[in-house]
Structure formats: C-alpha cells, structure tokens
Image: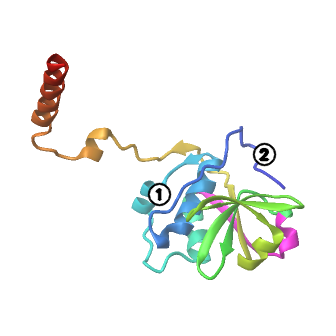
Amino acid sequence: MATAPFFRGGRLPLILQTEVAECGLACLAMVASYLGLRTDLAALRARFSISLNGISMLSLVEYADRLRLSSRPVLLTLEELPHLRTPAILHWGENHFVVLSRATAKEVLIHDPAVGLRRLSYEETSRKFTGSALELAPTTDFAPSDERRKISVKALMGKLDGWWQSVSLLFVMALARIFRE
C-alpha cells in the first residue's frame, strides 16, 4: 500500500453525500482533503456542476485535473487492490463510488460516502468492486489550501424575527418557576 510521500500525517476524512448523485464528488473531496486541498461538498458543488444522474469516471478525471491533481484510471483485479496508491477512488456497483483507504491481505477498508466507514472481506468486496479505480496525486503546481465553506450559527438560523422576545419570555418563565418553588 503506497501513500503520498509528502503527506505529513493526519487521516483520510469521511465526507458523506447529501444527495444520491454526489458520491463521486464526495470521494473527490475526501482524497483532495487528504492530499492537502481541504475542501468539502459545498465548495466542490460551487465549482463543478453534476447532473441528477451523478458523475462519471471521465468527469472525475476532469475535475481532479482542475483541482491540480493528476489522475491515473486503472483496471485491476481484486487481488491487486493492496498495490493501489491509496487513497484511491473505486467504482462500486452499478453507479456508485467509494474511497479505498487500505487493503490488506485479509480485509478492505473503504470510506463509503453513502454509509460511512466499512471494513469488508474480499468476498464482500468482490460483490461490488467493478475493477475500475482512480489513483490521484498532486501535480507540480498543486498548492495546499483550505476551501471549506465555513457556516456560522447565524447563517444556520437564518433571519428569525422575534427570537429575542421568545428567549426573553423563556428566561422570565424560568425565573418565575424558580421563585415560586
């Protein structure tokens, strides 16, 4: 199992998809973040458009190139998984992508954007792995950065009219209960 030689520690993040068609984008976000381009689905959604049908391996290669990541699509057998440069994106089932974190002689560890972290036997892996994978590595003009979109509490709450009055009323009611007892 090979890893990027310039990587200075840390973990492969788990990024879960929020829509069915976002698995490829979530996988790209996981690998790019591991390699030093800290990103998330919101940032990639703003950068790339995906259809309701999802994303193809060809689109993943194009998007990786635009992120300054070199890509190498490979066809391989199940037994060759331990020799893949990880993390790598695997084509999974009919229309899904996952990230291979590690493959040992006994098990395969994947980050599935639909369900989370999964440890699978080779028998379980053989049911879904199609034989297509995408290895990614930074190009010479790659620059580590942080593109994650920060969301404030204020943005999550939106414009709530009358919230101050409601909080004040709750406070007064709590005080009244304390003094009543």
Name the residue located 45 percent from the left edge and 66 percent from the top edge.
Answer: 48
Front one among 1 and 18: 18
Name the amino acid, label 1: Leu
Q: Is residue 72 magenta?
A: yes
Q: Nearer the viewer, mark 1 or mark 2?
A: 1
Left or right, 48 with reference to 114: left
- The residue range painted magenta reads 68-81
Q: Amino acid at mark 2?
A: Pro
Residue 179, x across and y down, in percent: 15, 17
Quadrant containing the N terminus is bottom right
In the rendered image of this protein, does residue 10 appear above or below residue 113?
above
Q: Is residue 141 above or below residue 24?
A: above
Residue 5 disc label:
2
For mark 1, what is the residue? 41
Which element type, helix, strand or loop, lies under badge 1?
Answer: helix
| Residue 80 x %, y % | 86, 69
Q: Position of residue 10 (x, y in %)?
A: 67, 40
Q: Residue at x 47, y 57 (%)?
A: 41
